[in-house]
Image (tube, rainbow, N blue to C red):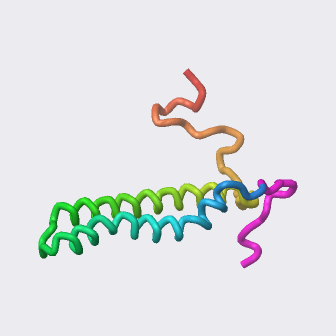
Amino acid sequence: MSGLFNRLPGHVRTPAGLERRVLRRLPRVLVVGTVLLALPALAARLLSGAGTLTMVDIYSLSLIVLHWTVVFTVGIGAFIVMVMKGPAYVADAYPLSDAERPAAGLSGRPAGGR
């Protein structure tokens, strides 16, 4: 398995930055944000005593789903930055059959010609 990934010689890894702090804080932000956004619906149910408070529930639920989506998107972005700062890898080289003479493009003319 170690032969699959060949590190680029001489590549310097970039030190971890803001993305690591963001990734560490995301679970807490997810839980705290969800609880805070659910509080209006819970408070409306406790204070009004009515069984159906659909508008408050719908608004709270839609904001919770929006919050989860934002947290997930920020997490993907931070993960991508973290991966891009990691070590560089070299793909295995393969011989090109038309390396000396490039193949014709879609027009039938050689590439770069008029």
Which residue in the rendered view is the most extreme toward the bottom?
A: 1
Please indicate, yes or no, whether residue 100 appears anywhere in the rendered image. Answer: yes
Mainly helix, strand or loop, the magenta region?
loop
Residue 48 horizontal/vertical position (percent): 17, 70
- Residue 46: x, y in percent? 23, 74
| Residue at the image position 39 percent from the left and 65 percent from the top | 36
Q: Please tell me whether residue 67 is drawn above or below residue 114 in the rendered image.
A: below
Residue 90 appears in the rendering:
no
Residue 19 falls inside the magenta stretch: no
| Frontmost residue, 90 versus 25 | 25
Which picture quadrant has residue 21? bottom right
**Residue pushed farthest front?**
47
Q: Nearer the viewer, residue 69 or 88?
A: 69
Q: Is residue 5 magenta?
A: yes
Residue at (36%, 64%) from the top-left corner? 37
Magenta highlight range: 1-14
Horizontal side, residue 3 vs residue 110: left or right: right
Q: In the displayed structure, would residue 51 be above or below residue 67?
A: below
Q: In the rendering, at what x and y percent does residue 103 appear?
A: 58, 40
**Quadrant location of the N terminus?**
bottom right
* Residue at the spot 59% in from the left edge and 57% down from the top edge: 78
Which residue shows up at 60% across the image and 60% down it?
22
Front residue of 99 and 19: 19
Q: Is residue 9 left or right of residue 86?
A: right
Is residue 54 found left or right of 75 in the rendered image?
left
| Quarter location, residue 18 | bottom right
On the image, the x and y values in percent for residue 83 come to 65, 60
Asked where in the image residue 39 lies, by quadrant, the reply is bottom left
Q: Is residue 44 left or right of residue 66?
A: left
Please identify the quadrant where the C terminus is shown: top right
* Depth order, front residue of 9/53: 53
Farthest right residue in view:
10
